[in-house]
Image (cartoon, rainbow, N blue to C red):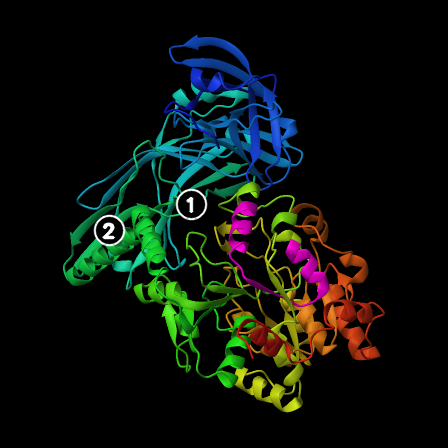
């Protein structure tokens, strides 16, 4: 986004006319002067899809130009989408666009409902004070106008709540405030005072909507809840409507109430309340991501409070931009010191695992070249994956890590290093990467749907990082061609096969598989299904944390196959889900945090995957593979795109339902397994270099014989 000057494009007014949303915006004169033609741009947050609507000048007001435009709702009434509003230009060669700022009024009341299918179109103010529109299923629309938190622990709330269905407005309405704990162990209902809100109807009552009934006030005496909790609890607040009609009633529950957006940054409030037996602390805050109004109630201990305060202060200092700049400068100066020629720093998947190609190279060097001093770079949240081993590890971004990484002669990683770290001139950077590409990579991607970046920024950062690599490991000629183009890599390509697959070639025997099953607690009398899907770029909680909906029906799998099989889940390292498999105890096992998938390959009798590169590695075992690709059209055409005709050349059947997965597994059982005709061409193209000697080839190339 290009923002010039201190003045912002600000929403003046929203309203409806002829079923169109009319938008009036104050545009600073200095911004208006940079655009040949002015448009209202709606940019879909996840897909970067753009809708444009002409803006026309109405008048000039001080330093602003008042412009007006209309949004035709039918053009954006599709799917679960979030549209961000900009003022910008479509002129060729111009990149000007400016976010539309909100005046923080109750924009949600300007919703509109589409009856086929029932969808609701809701303008709202984002947490950063900008205007957006979301399209979703019918939901309660709530707004908190005012909060006050007294020293006695009384939370006073006022606001409004609307369920966007006109049919409900003519019936008897019962209003409740619902308070729930995050663990669902505590819930209570309170009756608020109903407040007439004719002001809402006058201001927002379009298309016959009447909001007179929508207001509420309530005082919540939090001290009354203390006796219900034996441990610390976090509470959230909801609004519940019950509509009573003829011979029926319907209940609607809102999402948790959000703290009202304001121009001032909200500071959490903490009160200490004395009880008969101890002191309790009540903390009123808003959740970090969704900004829900959160009430935390717990025991008050002075020592613990002091420690927590110090810890929060340290974290605040660490995250300050100046600290990062100082760290970067220190790293640069330490990098001028002589290289420690026998020091190697390894890192796998951003310091989360002892695994993959870096592990294979480490183990080979450890056995053949013991004179090297080798360290593992470890994310502090994943130290447990390295403890209890004969490994030397350093916590990422610690002072020791800073000195060790800056002076080490060799870096070995399978993912990207932080972009802000400058590579010292005489450091040798070995990038092993972590898979044969099926999905498009880096420069080859048409669009990037990941959080916290844009397509252009993602590609530029990737290419900048790849320019630091001195060596890049490739599993085959096909990958080498893609890597050079997608990463714009012009240094030494080591076409050797993947070091991590040496284990598959050298340990593929019955004794090893039995030992692994015993170690993992897998029944020896059951066959193993390994489900290892990849992540989806557009399904995420935040930057670096992706969500995954488990579309594979475990209940159906267990009912049909549970007597002969167990299933192991192995999610991608970027996926943040923790699946509750307690209903499937003894049948389904979550090995997502297992350090190295190569051991799971060995014990798996059959692989179920989608577009993950795991099938290129598993192909070395020549065992059955099923491709569960329920969303292939979206993944292929929208998110990534494929490098080859996956649907024609996949080394196993493609299916879209759990029933089809089960049918293919039963076919293997009844007919026996034979490699499909597509397998041998697949093997000769992707697996031909795997001989159990890849680690040796890489080490001799980079470190010398």
Residue, disc 2: 282
How crowded pointer 2 is (Cα within 10 Å; few <14, some 14-19, many 20+) is rated as many
In this rendering, does residue 440 appear at all? Answer: no
Quick check: is 179 in the magenta stretch? Answer: no
Residue 640: where, in percent of width, then height?
66, 50
Residue, disc 1: 290
- Which is closer to the viewer, label 1 or label 2? 1
Task: Farthest residue to the bottom: give it.
Answer: 511
Is there a contact, CB below 8 Å, between mark 1 and mark 2?
no
Q: CA distance from mark 1 to mark 2?
A: 20 Å
Q: Secondary structure at mark 2?
A: strand
Residue range corresponding to the magenta coloring: 458-484
- The relative height of residue 626 versus residue 242 in the rendered view (above or below) is below
Residue 64: where, in percent of width, then height?
42, 14
Q: Quadrant of the C terminus?
A: bottom right
Q: Residue at x 76, y 58 (%)?
A: 646
- The dot on residue 336 is none
Quick check: is 462 in the magenta stretch? Answer: yes
In this rendering, does residue 226 appear at all? Answer: yes
């Amino acid at each position: 986004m290009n923002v010039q000057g201190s003045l912002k494009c600000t929403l003046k007014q929203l309203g409806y006319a002829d079923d169109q949303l009319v938008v009036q915006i104050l545009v600073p004169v200095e911004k208006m002067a940079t655009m040949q033609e002015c448009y209202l741009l709606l940019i879909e947050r996840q897909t970067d899809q753009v809708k444009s609507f002409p803006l026309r000048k109405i008048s000039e007001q001080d330093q602003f130009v008042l412009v007006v435009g209309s949004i035709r709702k039918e053009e954006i009434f599709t799917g679960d989408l979030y549209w961000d509003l900009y003022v910008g230009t479509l002129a060729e060669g111009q990149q000007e666009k400016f976010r539309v700022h909100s005046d923080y009024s109750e924009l949600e009341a300007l919703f509109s409902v589409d009856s086929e299918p029932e969808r609701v179109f809701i303008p709202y103010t984002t947490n950063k004070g900008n205007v957006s529109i979301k399209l979703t299923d019918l939901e309660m629309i709530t707004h908190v106008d005012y909060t006050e938190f007294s020293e006695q622990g009384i939370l006073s709330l006022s606001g409004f709540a609307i369920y966007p269905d006109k049919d409900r407005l003519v019936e008897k309405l019962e209003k409740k405030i619902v308070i729930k704990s995050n663990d669902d162990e505590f819930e209570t209902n309170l009756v608020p005072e109903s407040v007439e809100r004719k002001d809402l109807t006058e201001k927002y009552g379009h298309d016959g909507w009447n909001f007179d009934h929508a207001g509420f006030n309530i005082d919540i005496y939090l001290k009354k809840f203390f006796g219900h909790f034996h441990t610390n609890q976090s509470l959230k607040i909801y609004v519940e409507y019950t509509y009573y009609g003829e011979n029926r009633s319907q209940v609607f529950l809102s999402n948790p109430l959000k703290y009202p957006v304001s121009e001032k940054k909200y500071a959490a409030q903490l009160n200490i309340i004395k009880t008969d037996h101890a002191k309790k602390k009540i903390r009123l805050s808003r959740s970090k991501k969704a900004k829900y109004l959160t009430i935390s109630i717990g025991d008050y201990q002075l020592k613990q409070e002091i420690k927590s305060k110090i810890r929060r202060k340290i974290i605040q200092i660490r995250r300050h931009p100046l600290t990062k700049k100082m760290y970067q400068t220190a790293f640069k100066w330490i990098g001028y010191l002589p290289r420690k020629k026998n020091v190697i720093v390894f890192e796998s998947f951003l310091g989360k695992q002892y695994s993959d190609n870096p592990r294979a190279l480490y183990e080979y060097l450890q056995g053949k070249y013991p004179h090297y001093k080798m360290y593992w770079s470890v994310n502090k949240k994943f130290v447990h994956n390295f403890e209890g081993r004969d490994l030397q590890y350093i916590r990422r971004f610690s002072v020791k890590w800073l000195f060790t990484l800056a002076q080490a002669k060799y870096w070995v990683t399978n993912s990207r290093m932080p972009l802000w770290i400058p590579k010292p001139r005489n450091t040798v950077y070995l990038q092993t990467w972590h898979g044969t590409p099926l999905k498009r990579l880096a420069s080859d991607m048409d669009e990037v749907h990941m959080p916290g970046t844009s397509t252009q920024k993602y590609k530029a950062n990737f290419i900048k990082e790849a320019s630091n690599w001195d060596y890049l490991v490739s599993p085959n000629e096909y990958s080498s061609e893609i890597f050079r183009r997608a990463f714009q890599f012009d240094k030494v390509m080591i076409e050797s096969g993947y070091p991590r697959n040496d284990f598959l070639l050298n340990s593929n025997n019955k004794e090893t598989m039995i030992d692994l099953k015993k170690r993992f607690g897998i029944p020896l009398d059951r066959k193993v299904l390994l489900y290892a899907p990849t992540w989806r770029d557009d399904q995420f909680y935040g930057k670096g944390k992706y969500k995954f909906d488990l579309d594979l029906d475990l209940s159906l799998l267990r009912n049909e196959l549970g007597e002969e099989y167990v299933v192991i889940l192995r999610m991608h390292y970027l996926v943040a889900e923790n699946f509750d498999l307690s209903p499937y105890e003894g049948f389904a096992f979550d090995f997502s945090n297992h350090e190295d998938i190569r051991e799971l390959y060995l014990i798996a009798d059959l692989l179920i995957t989608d577009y993950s590169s795991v099938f290129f590695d598993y192909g070395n075992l020549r065992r059955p593979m099923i491709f569960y690709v329920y969303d292939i059209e979206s993944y292929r055409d929208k998110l990534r795109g494929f490098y080859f005709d996956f649907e024609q050349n996949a080394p196993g059947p493609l299916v879209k339902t759990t029933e089809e997965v089960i049918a293919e597994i039963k076919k293997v059982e009844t007919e026996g397994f034979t490699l499909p005709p597509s397998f041998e061409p697949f093997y000769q193209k992707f697996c031909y270099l795997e001989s159990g000697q890849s680690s040796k080839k890489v080490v001799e190339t980079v470190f010398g014989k």
